[in-house]
Amino acid sequence: MEQTAEILARLDALGVAYEYHEHPPVHKALDRYDMGLDFGACVCKNLFLTTRNESAFYVLMLQAEKNADLRRLARAIGSSRLCFGSDERLFELLGQRPGMVSPLGVIHDRGRAVTVLLDVGLRGRRLCVHPSDNTKTIVLEMAGLERYLTSFGAKIIFIEP
C-alpha cells in the first residue's frame, strides 16, 4: 500500500478529522504561501536530524517561518550535538526521501528509533502536514497529530526550536 493511503487509513481508524489536498510539488515550506497552499492552517517544515554517532534520530517539526538552532536544541534534549541525518538513514528508518520528511512517516519506524520533536508553538493549531509526498497535504489539528504519533508508540518531545 502507498504511504499516503496507509497514513490516511490510520487517521481514519483513529477517528482523526483531517482535510486532504492534492497539488503541484512544494519544494520549500514557505513556498506554500506564494502557491496559495496554506489552506488556512499553520505551515510547517520538517527536518531529519541525528546525533553525530547516529545513536539517536529525530524528526523536528516547526513553524515554517522559524529557524532551528541545532546547538540549543541539542542541549534541550540532552545531546552534545545534532546534525542532519543522511538520505540513506531517512529512507531506512521512515521510508522517506529528502524534501518529503514528515512526522507522519513514523508509520514505517518499526524499531521506534525516531523521536518526534514538535515546536511548542504548534500546540492547539491546525497544521499543514504532507504525507511523505510533497504533492499532497493533510490539514489536521495538533491533537490529531499527537493521537496518530502515540498510536505507534512514537516518543514526542515539545521543544522551543
Image (spheres, grey):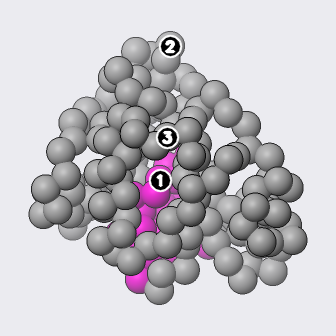
Task: Tell which tag, 3 or 2, sits nearer the viewer.
Answer: 3
**Image point 55% across, 73% down: which residue?**
114
Q: CA distance from mark 3 to mark 2?
A: 21 Å
Residue located beneath label 3 in the image: 122
Q: Which residues are magenta?
A: 87-110
* Dot 3 crowding, Cα within 10 Å, few <14, some 14–19, many 20+: some
Q: Nearer the viewer, residue 75 or 84?
A: 75
- Residue 133 placement (x, y as % from top left): 39, 47
Residue 138 in view (yes/no): no
**How many labels were placed on the picture?**
3
Give whichever of discs 1 and 2 has the lower sequence position. Answer: 2
Q: Are marks 3 and 1 in contact (CB under 8 Å)?
A: no
Q: Amino acid at mark 2?
A: Asp
Q: Is residue 106 left or right of residue 137?
A: right
Question: Which residue corresponds to mark 2?
Answer: 34
Quarter occupied by the N terminus? bottom left
- Identify whether 154 is placed above or below 29: below
Q: Amino acid at mark 1?
A: Ser
Discs 3/1, front: 3
Q: Residues within 10 Å of mark 2 (few under 14, many from 20)?
A: few
Q: Quadrant of residue 18?
A: top left
Q: Which residue is mark 1?
A: 102
| Magenta stretch: includes residue 106 | yes
Residue 11 placement (x, y as % from top left): 21, 57
Q: Secondary structure at mark 3?
A: helix
Nearer to us in this view, 60 or 88: 60
Mark 1 surroundings within 10 Å by alpha-carbon count, few (fewer than 14), some (14 through 19), many (20 or more) = many
Q: Secondary structure at mark 1?
A: loop
Q: Is residue 10 left or right of residue 78?
A: left
